[in-house]
Image (cartoon, rainbow, N blue to C red):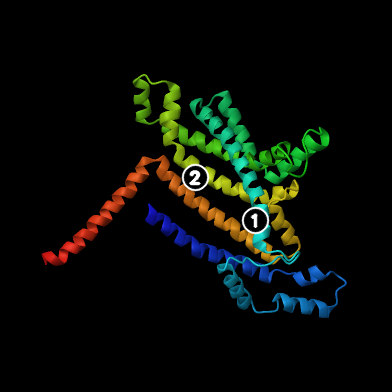
Amino acid sequence: MLRYIVKRILITIPVLLGVTFIIFAMMFFTPGDPAQLMLGDFATQEEVIALRAEMGLDDPFFTQYFRYLKGLFRGDLGTSFTNGLPVLTEIQNRLPVTIKLSVFCMIFAMLIGIPFGILSAVRQYSFLDNIAMVLALLGISMPNFWLALILILFFSVSLGLLPASGLYGALYYIMPVISISAVSIATITRMTRSSMLEVIRQDYIRTARAKGKSETSIIFKHALKNALIPIITVIGIQFASALSGAVVNEQIFAIPGLGKLMVDAIKARNYPIIRGGVLVIAFMFSFLNLFIDLLYAFVDPRIRSLYARRREHKTSLTETEKEAPNNA
């Protein structure tokens, strides 16, 4: 298992390097002059040229890229064009807000999606199942930014029940969490239902019922445990989607997170902030995928035994190769 973790981490390195190259190239060839934006419309051409030279924006593409990589390996993500603060400091100030919001979204999605999926599977084709599937279809069909605007219009503008912007208390989380997690709830519900339907039709479930075990024990102790692998996969993907969905929704609800920081940076052509934010999100995606793979082995003993058999097979092959010269 340790060898597998190290291997996955080593694979992540070229992935992150590829991400840095792609985002650097996109920012380099995107129209717009950060120096002009920083100085304003009334700056002279000489002032713009001097600032571009000072910021190193006149250097060739690969010169700028390798200079960025050199700083990256030292833990330096660059300096913000707008306020002169280190990018790492800006991200450290904003990232906890985005992670906290995303965690709340996934907890809410799991608390709603998994029970609804189980009930739909146990009572297949019932009225409850039909209602759950219709709501799931609506949840998948609605863009989260559109739902966010509808929630603001209804609960803030019309009823005045919930605050429309900021993040200063529990009430401020309600609409962002609902709008971001709607797609996740629908997806988890559908996957839980599908996975549970496949499991509860297995022979060992019929055997457990024949032995007189309670339906609650059968569903939660036997069926759900064996149906968790695809559900965990979907939860991991949806957590990553919640991180990306926060980019737009933080702007709508004026939440001071990483998403709003990146959107503001895009408007200001603040390339270091954009590159740093994308790199951090890519790293979180890679770490999340690794965590999900490790969680598989914890949930399903068959995966652990598979790793053990592979290790034993490699050990036996090594011992055979060592004995072969002696036999010859």
Residue 87 visible, this angle? yes
Q: Nearer the viewer, residue 117 or 294?
A: 294
Residue furthest to the right: 42
Between label 2 and label 1, give the one nearer the viewer.
1
> Residue placed at 46% from the left, 38% from the top?
228
* Residue 323 higher or lower than 205, as above or below: below
Residue 318: which disc? none
Which SS class for mark 1? helix
Q: Nearer the viewer, residue 24 or 119?
A: 24
Q: Amino acid at mark 2?
A: Thr
Tell me where residue 193 appears, x and y as whole percent.
51, 33
Residue furthest to the left: 327
Q: Within 10 angstroms of label 1, few (less than 14), some, or many (20 or more) residues?
A: few
> Residue placed at 63% from the left, 75% from the top?
64
Q: Is 78 left or right of 150, judged from the image as shown?
A: left
Quadrant of the rendered image containing residue 126: top right
Residue furthest to the top: 212
Q: Within 10 angstroms of label 2, few (less than 14), some, or many (20 or more) residues?
A: some
Residue 200 visible, this angle? no
Residue 233: which disc? 2
Quadrant of the rendered image containing residue 40: bottom right
Whether the residues at callouts 2 and 1 have beta carbons within 8 Å, the answer is no
Q: Amino acid at mark 1?
A: Gln
Q: Nearer the viewer, residue 127 or 297?
A: 297
> Residue placed at 70% from the left, 47% from the top?
249
Q: Earlier in the sequence, mark 2 or mark 1?
A: 1
Tell me where residue 286 appears, x and y as whole percent.
52, 55
User: How far apart are the two marked residues, 2 and 1, measured between alpha carbons?
Assistant: 28 Å
Tell me where residue 232 appears, x and y as whole percent.
49, 42
Residue 92: which disc? 1
